[in-house]
Amino acid sequence: MTLQEAIKARHSVRAYKEMPLEAEASKRLEDEIAAVNSDGRLHIQLIQDEPKAFQGTLAKYGKFRGVANYIVMAGRKGADLDERIGYYGEHLVLLAQTLGLNTCWVGLSYKKIPGTYVLEEDEVIKAYIAIGYGETQGAGHKVKAVQDVSTAGDDAPSWFRRGVEAALLAPTAVNQQKFHFEYVPAVDGKLARVVARRGFSLIGYTHLDLGIAKYHFEVGAGKENFEWVTKVK
């Protein structure tokens, strides 16, 4: 499965079979987490065979069941931490999909179990990602139109539209899709530019959501076709 195929196949899954992660999948994830932590200046950790974080009132409220494996999304405090968490976390989510695993981003419906993770000075946890073998493959949700979240007009190249379409399949908090992509044509022989903005939301999580959407956009559009110019409003 390619990353493009993973984007189309991936849906949030909240109910999991009582199965440990296969050894090969576990190793692939651990290896990639090590690389992501280095590239993204993060402290992401894979926790296995630990069901307590998704037991109790919060998990029931979030309709989680059978979660015994999860990824702790943590890093040092900083203005761009949430966006980096979203961007690199979604890289792991799509990798997991290619490995035959299911996932779900979790912002609130979990408990922090002492001793299951390590935090260095000035580090914080921003989210968990439930991971495992789902009881189902999940289901898609209604998404906005390309024109609602971008400037994909007649002058925009096909790669830009593909990027926006991929971003629209990205998971966001309560499916709010509070992001916008603007196409800026290439000049003086330079690459075209894309401006990524987040919108306002009372729910929050828009920085994290933008990071997730930007990763999807890159997969759909091809990183070689443009460079980012990020403006946050």
Image (cartoon, rainbow, N blue to C red):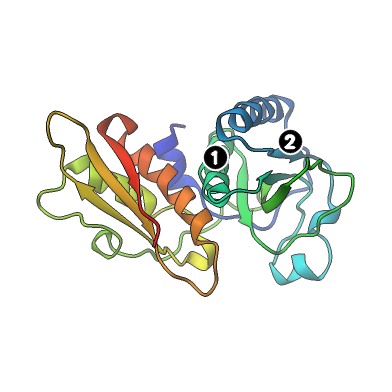
The amino acid on which the numbered mark 1 sits, given as a three-letter code, is Tyr
Q: Could you say whether the residue bearing mark 2 is in a helix, strand or loop?
A: loop
User: Residue 134: x, y in percent?
Assistant: 65, 49
Q: Residue furthest bottom?
A: 202
User: Residue 218: x, y in percent?
Assistant: 37, 39
Q: Name the quadrant containing residue 160.
A: top left
Q: How far apart are marks 2 and 1 (CA)?
A: 21 Å
Which quadrant of the figure contains the C terminus? bottom left
Front residue (pair 132, 180): 180
Badge number at residue 67: none
The amino acid on which the numbered mark 2 sits, given as a three-letter code, is Leu
- Relative vertical location of residue 18 with respect to residue 27 in this rendering, above or below: below
Q: Name the quadrant containing residue 101.
A: top right
Left or right: residue 161 compared with residue 180 = left
Q: Could you say whether the residue bearing mark 1 is in a helix, strand or loop?
A: helix
Badge number at residue 88: 1
